[in-house]
Amino acid sequence: MSYKTEGRQKVFNLMRVRASRTRKASAHPRSSSEPLKRVELASVRQVLGLIPVPHALIGGHAVSILGHPRTTSDIDVLVAPSDLEAAVQALEAKGGKRGSPLTIGGITMVMPGEEEIDLVSPGEAWVQDAIAGAVSTPHGRVASRPWIVLMKMWASRGLQEDTDMLYMIKAMSPAERRETKRLFRQWLPSDQEDLAQMLDLARYV
């Protein structure tokens, strides 16, 4: 599901320009974003505590926890297809309503107060491994940086996904970079060239 390399090159060029222009500014995020971040992460802890099956936080909140604070309008949680219905029923027991199905697999749940939770459940062979590889944080189980990069490359939905990948790579240790390359060799071999460009682009941030 990733972009063809030639089509993605335009995005890489744009990101390289943006990264070089905003390098200093990105090192000093606005303090006004911190109260919002605390409120969002408190909500994340509560939501993850409601899901009784193995899971991993992904999406914008995971990116925030693992190195690049940003706002997002919903909470994305990865669950295996075999566990999806149990997760849905657990949220329904807390007042959640079933919303629209997700194009990549899963469903949106609308909780009281209109908070949306995307239960992401792709029918991909790597899903169980991604959940098993989640890291424990004070906010709950969060997908690791290598897995977040792989999932975002797989989803390939635009500039925000690419920006998230870039900042996850920037925050990686050498061991995490090696693990990312290994995961791509195993699960997304056709996207290894795109990953190499992302690894190079991270130097500009």
Image (spheres, rainbow, N blue to C red):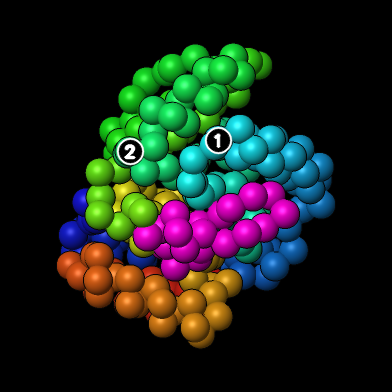
Disc 1 residue type? Ile
Q: Is residue 114 visible?
A: no
The image shows residue 165 at horizontal and vertical percentages of: 45, 62
Looking at the image, tell me whether mark 1 or mark 2 is earlier in sequence order: 1
Residue 24, picture quadrant: bottom right
**Relative to 5, is 174 above or below?**
below
Measuring 49% from the left and 71% from the top, which residue is drawn there? 169
Q: Is residue 191 left or right of residue 86?
A: left
Measuring 30% from the left and 57% from the top, which residue is drawn there? 126
Q: Nearer the viewer, residue 141 or 163?
A: 141
Please name the residue that numbered disc 1 is placed on.
Answer: 51
Numbered range of the magenta stretch: 129-149
**Relative to 72, is 101 above or below?**
above
The verdict on residue 146 being magenta is yes
Q: Which mark is residue 82?
A: 2
Disc 2 residue type? Ser
Q: Which mark is residue 146?
A: none
Residue 116, picture quadrant: top right
The image shows residue 177 at horizontal and vertical percentages of: 45, 79
Q: What element does badge 2 sit on?
A: helix
Q: What element does badge 1 sit on?
A: loop
Q: Is residue 33 visible?
A: yes
